[in-house]
Image: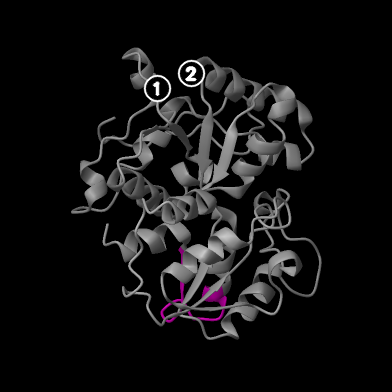
Amino acid sequence: MEEENLASESNESPESAAPKSDAGATAMTSEPDTVADTITVPTMAELSAKGESPDVLFWVGCAGAYDDRYQKVTRDFVKILHHLKINYAVLGIEESCTGDPAKRAGNEFVYQMQAMRNIELMNGYGVKKVITACPHCFNIIKNEYPELGGEYEVLHHSTYLQQLINAGVLKVAGDGEFKGKTITFHDSCYLGRGNDIYEAPRELLRALDGNLVEMKRNKSKGLCCGAGGAQMFKDAEKGDREVNIERSEEALELQPDVIATACPFCMTMMSDGVKHFNKEKDVKVMDLAELVSKSNNL
């Protein structure tokens, strides 16, 4: 798919929490003079028309397609896939919201409508393996789509990248930009407590040869960023303090150079927390894919 602007199509339902994503185009809308400008991202429709099928489907997700900040994560993950010559494809304009926000907000009807549309589409293409950088997409496709007929091997990008490193396919420069830098990792609820994935992100970060330090609440005892369970899309509830402010304070107590995340919601909430303390010039909030891409000068 050649470079194009993001589509403005919305989901079929007015109750949908997010619009249909032009997932194929997103990776193309990068800053000038980057490798992503020259990458043609294949779509499932294009490969199917040629009688071909990819090894993996990269599920971009609504945030990966529409959120300005998380589009950078999408681009960097695509750079990695391209660099490694992975046989992958995206759904492009055919991809729609997984239905997770609707389900978490209590609208089971809208969720099932969105989920069934996606399942019919993926089954029609014969999709076997799905990779996504969003724990919310990962959780619902992996754990809740099967009961509706959508059975796939589903991996979060942190696990996938670590598998590539373990297999010797992906090299991470241990003496690169992050050598000796203090990095702390914020556990996404849907990745950690929801799916018991704690070590893959940390192993990946250790490969950067940085100084990985843990917040006082981490892994199974980690604190939510404050955006889960559809909280991202509603006003804050009554209380003494915003959850993301408390979590960001915990991270900043460690005086990190980088707060690593693996979720679009967590990235938004932690970034806002860092800005609340006026530390955005000193502390970077980065996704795992961005760290790997940058360490390889992609």
Q: Amino acid at mark 1?
A: Ser
The magenta region covers: 274-286
Residue drawn 32% across the image and 36% down it = 5
Residue furthest front as drawn = 167
Q: Position of residue 191 (x, y in %)?
A: 65, 53
Regarding mark 2 in the picture, which secondary structure is present there?
helix
Disc count in the image?
Answer: 2
Whether residue 110 is visible: no
Residue 53 found in image quarter: top left
Whether residue 220 is visible: yes
Residue drawn 52% across the image and 15% down it = 124
Q: Quadrant of the N terminus?
A: top left
| Residue 109 among those drawn in magenta | no
Residue drawn 57% across the image and 82% down it = 252
Which residue is identified by label 2? 125
Which residue is identified by label 1? 53
Q: Are marks 2 and 1 in contact (CB under 8 Å)?
A: yes
Answer above or below: position of 147 versus 71.
above
Left or right, 105 with reference to 152: right
Residue 124 image label? none
